[in-house]
Amino acid sequence: MIEKILSPETYALLGQWALGFCKNALVAFIVYIVGSWLIKWVVKLFTKVLERNKVEPTLYSFLTSIVNVVLWLLLIIVLVSIFGIETSSFIALFASAGVAIGMAMSGTLQNFAGGVMILLFKPYKVGDYIEAQGYAGTVKAIQIFNTIIRTVDAQTIIIPNGGLSTGSLKNYSTEKYRRVDLDFQFAYGTDLDKVKEAIHEIQRQNPLILQGPVDDSDVVAAPWIGLTKLADSGVVVNTRTWCKGSDYWTVYFYMNETVYQQLKERGFMFPFNRMDVNIINK
């Protein structure tokens, strides 16, 4: 019955199709074997580059997964094209889906891009004390989309990476040494030479305060004291004191408390704002 339905020409076409399919299947199999080996080799090479550049573990695993998925997607498109299937429609479909997803997740993608930039260029790292986006605290974790910091009063703040990568950021942990700048106001008529001598003595008493330049820094200088302003109620004296970054707050509070206590005991006056009211009786 089948022989009556199928003509010799049909048999020939089916034979050619079967032969072509077998050839394509063989080629596809070889391409798959070679392609899968190349993907493993490229991913392995990519991971070595990331390890050599000491990329953060979070970004390391994410980028490796992205590269692996993209390469396998390209391999699938090549395999499909071997069988003569038009791949332009698949590529257009993927492109359209990518555009739609990008528009729907524009904010999320911005945070993702910011996270990649932060993890690559490392403007800060876990453990650094930073100030950005109106918050200040110690960095506890750097994720792909957010950075988590803990404030000095033990609050957990989650900041999107998009703003951190494009906005201004102050990193207090980058430099080994920091300068403590403080202003003290004294009454008019105060002997400034005696004020300077007393504050210098206070600076020399604390071993955490650096008394001059150090070999591993080109910014550290000896303690400095100078008159910076003639205010309404008195003269303003500025003190500049260098110390290690880890000792900043210790030196900060030490200078404030000790200057106030010792100079008050020596008779120096700390003025305060006042208003004179004159009553005229008519």
Image (spheres, helix red, strand yellow):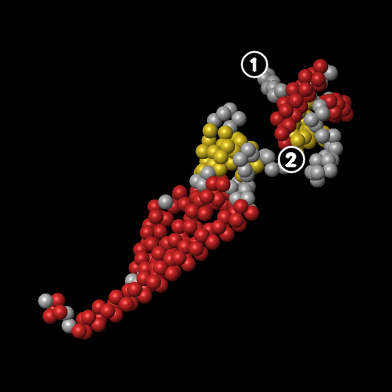
Whether 83 is drawn above or below 115: the answer is below
Judged left or right of residue 142, residue 74 is: left
Name the residue rendered at 63%, 44% in the picture: 124
User: Outermost residue toward the bottom?
Assistant: 9
Quadrant assignment, res 255:
top right
Q: Element type at marker 2?
A: loop
Which residue is nearer to you in this view: 9 or 252?
A: 9
**Neighbour class for label 2 at 10 Å: few (<14), some, many (≥20)?**
few
Name the residue rendered at 29%, 75% in the picture: 18
Q: Which amino acid does label 1 sit on?
A: Lys
Residue 12 picture location, percent across and down: 25, 82
Q: Which amino acid does label 2 sit on?
A: Lys
Whether 66 is drawn above or below 22: the answer is above
Which residue is nearer to you in this view: 200 or 79?
A: 79
Quadrant for the C terminus, please. top right
Q: Element type at marker 1?
A: loop
- Mark 2 lies on residue: 176
Quadrant for the N terminus, please. bottom left
Residue 195 visible in the snapshot:
no
